Structures are given as C-alpha cells and as structure tokens.
C-alpha cells in the first residue's frame, strides 16, 4: 500500500469516526456496563396510550439507528487498528492485497473483491 494513500484513508476514517460518535451522542447514552454499547434515550411524551405507542416507536427506530452506527464504528476501529499494525489493505481471507480502488471506495474493507464475492455466493 502507498503510504500517502493509507494516510489519506486514515484521516478519512478518523473524521468519520468523530461524526458517528457525535451522532450517537445526540440520542444515546453510553451503556454503563458494556463498553462501546449505546442506549437510546427514552423520551417520555406522556402517559396516554398514544404517547406510549409513539415512545416505543421512537425508541425502536433509535435502537436500530444506533446499532447501525455502532457497527460502522466497529468497522472503522478495526480498519484503524489494521493501519496501526501495518496490516491494512491485505485481505483477511487470502492474504492478497485488496487494491487501492476498492479501499478508496470502501475504506473499511477487510476482504478482497474475489473473497467477498465468494462469501456472498456462499461458496
Ligand atoms: Zn481475498
């Protein structure tokens, strides 16, 4: 991997990481017991049945949004870890280089296109 490209990707990942943490902070609180786990705040709209249904609706939506963000964060963290360890850009399945084009399009990739396709087809 070209060092300049790795540095560029690293910067992008760090920016994205901050953005995601900022998003999570808006509607979740960090779980006291599980590191990296976020709990959406439960908005108390009122006590009527309608309000309760809305509260649950919002909570369910927030829960799925926060888990998507958490997963993105995990992908970014592991990509940053691979950069740090000098393993970035190498496919975790076949050990071949993933390729700059793919990495620039999807910086968190940990598998090359060939392996990814095989996995998706379930081969
Ligand atoms: Zn591969």
Image (cartoon, rainbow, N blue to C red):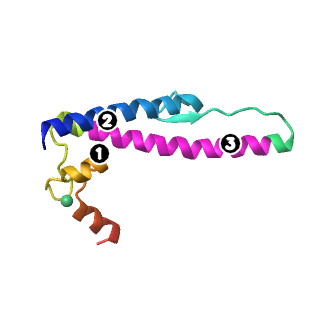
* Whole-percent x, y for residue 13 in the image: 32, 36
Residue, x 27% and y 68% (percent of image)?
118
Residue, x 50% and y 44% (percent of image)?
67
**Which residue is tagged 1?**
107
Q: Nearer the viewer, mark 2 or mark 3?
A: 2
* Whole-percent x, y for residue 114 in the image: 22, 65
Residue, x 19% and y 38% (percent of image)?
6
Residue, x 16% and y 42% (percent of image)?
87
- Which of marks 3 and 1 precedes in the sequence? 3
**Which residue is tagged 3?**
58
Range of magenta residues: 52-80
Quadrant the N terminus occupies: top left
* Whole-percent x, y for residue 5 in the image: 19, 39
**Which residue is tagged 2?**
12
Quadrant the C terminus occupies: bottom left
Query: Could you tell me how far apart the alpha carbons at marks 1 and 2 are, in whole angstroms?
Result: 9 Å
Q: Horizontal placement of 110 versus 68: left or right? A: left
Pointer 1 local density, CA inside 10 Å: few below 14, some 14–19, many at least 20: many
Q: Considering the numbered disc 2 on the image, is that residue within a helix, a strand or a loop?
A: helix
- Whether residue 119 can be seen here: yes
Q: Quarter of the image holding residue 58?
A: top right
- Whether residue 35 can be seen here: no
Main SS, magenta region, reads helix
- Which of marks 2 and 1 precedes in the sequence? 2
In the depicted structure, whether residue 91 falls above or below residue 67: below
Query: Could you tell me how far apart the alpha carbons at marks 1 and 3 are, in whole angstroms?
Result: 31 Å
């Amino acid at each position: 991997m070209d060092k300049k490209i790795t540095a560029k990707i690293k910067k992008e990942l760090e920016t994205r990481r901050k953005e995601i943490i900022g998003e999570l902070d808006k509607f979740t609180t960090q779980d006291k017991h599980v590191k990296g786990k976020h709990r959406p705040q439960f908005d108390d709209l009122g006590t009527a049945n309608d309000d309760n249904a809305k509260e649950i609706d919002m909570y369910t939506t927030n829960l799925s949004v926060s888990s998507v963000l958490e997963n993105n964060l995990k992908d970014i963290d592991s990509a940053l870890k691979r950069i740090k360890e000098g393993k970035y850009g190498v496919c975790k399945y076949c050990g071949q280089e993933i390729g700059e084009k793919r990495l620039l399009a999807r910086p968190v990739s940990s598998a090359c296109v060939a392996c990814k396709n095989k996995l998706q087809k379930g081969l």
